[in-house]
Amino acid sequence: MRTNFLPLAKCAPIVLLLAITIGSCKKSNIFGDTKVVIPTPPPDTVKKITDTTTFTLVWSDEFNGTSVDSKNWNMETGSLHVNNEKEYYQAANATVANGNLVITAKSESVGGFPYTSARMNTANKVNVAYGKIEARIKIPMGAGLWPAFWMLGSDINTGTTWPGCGEIDIMEHINADSLIYGTMHWSAAGNQADYGLKLSSSPSAYHVYSVTWDDTAIKWYVDNTLYVTGNIANDINNTDAFHKPFFIILNLAVAGDFPGQTVDLSKLPANMYVDYVRVYKAN
């Protein structure tokens, strides 16, 4: 997920295989057929994992109320003018009902954009450095839809520009395919660096999307399946950004460089359901 932010990306860690590009963040640079190709990890890195680490819950939003809790979330408004996205974000498109946060993308013209949706973040309210971050989400399927559960380095709000602040995309999905993307973005020697993999799943059903994160590695899971590990030990490959606090973001974009510009209007309005978001610390 492109990074602009309206003020107020048990198995031994593997060495990161860098995909370094210069310029704006576009997912085609990572997963496209004609750009950088991320290799399949060694056989022991995609399988059910029994991790002996235990965690203690330190924060959660279970969405059991009747509206978005402003103690936890900032609502972003307007267009970020990134990725050639076509949505206008507004708080009205994020509701809470039946124990779920519901982010709705609609076909309606606001602010010069043909679609509306919602984007929300925990900046200056919930900041995370290491631990386990997870959400249980049901994803809408349809051409042009781009839901995401991700994090940005908190210092983007104090002068550090992207990608130097770092980005951890816990879950991204596009269009109507079965693939879930887990990615990290950062700055290496002044250039954009990206690492990630994708996993086939059943996105239209609820799944738990999570990362576990310590001073040596970031690990991506769908339910209990580990599918990619990024090594950040000793700031290898300039990964120092991933040893600082991050904040959480939820959004549903419409169109853009990653999903393309074709939008299936028959799928709108489209709902992204979030059962909960939880943060744990390792014991």
Image (tube, helix red, strand yellow):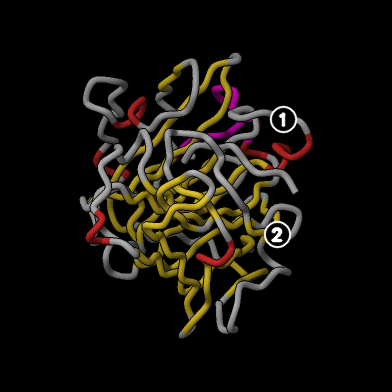
Residue at (27%, 28%) from the top-left corner?
Answer: 32
Give the magenta part as a residue range. 230-241
Residue 209: x and y in percent read 42, 59
Label 2 sits on residue: 126
Q: Secondary structure at mark 1?
A: loop
Residue at (29%, 36%) from the top-left corner?
Answer: 41
Mark 1 is on which residue type?
Thr
Q: Is residue 283 magenta?
A: no
Q: Quadrant of residue 26?
A: top left
> Against 170, is 192 above or below?
above
Q: Within 10 Å of the Cα at label 2, are there few (<14), some (14-19), or many (20+) other Cα atoms?
A: some
Give the overall secondary structure of the magenta segment. Answer: helix
Answer yes or no: is residue 10 visible.
Answer: no
Between 128 and 1, which is closer to the camera in this rendering? Answer: 1
Precedes in sequence: disc 2 or disc 1: 2
Task: Name the mark on residue 160.
Answer: 1
Task: Name the mark on residue 283.
Answer: none
Residue at (34%, 65%) from the top-left corner?
Answer: 269
Residue 267: x and y in percent read 26, 61
> Against 234, is 12 above or below?
below
Between 186 and 130, which is closer to the camera in this rendering? Answer: 186
Mark 2 is on which residue type?
Val
Q: Residue furthest right?
A: 158
Residue at (56%, 29%) from the top-left corner?
Answer: 186
Answer yes or no: is residue 19 visible.
Answer: yes
Image quadrant containing the C terminus: bottom right
Between 23 and 198, which is closer to the camera in this rendering? Answer: 23
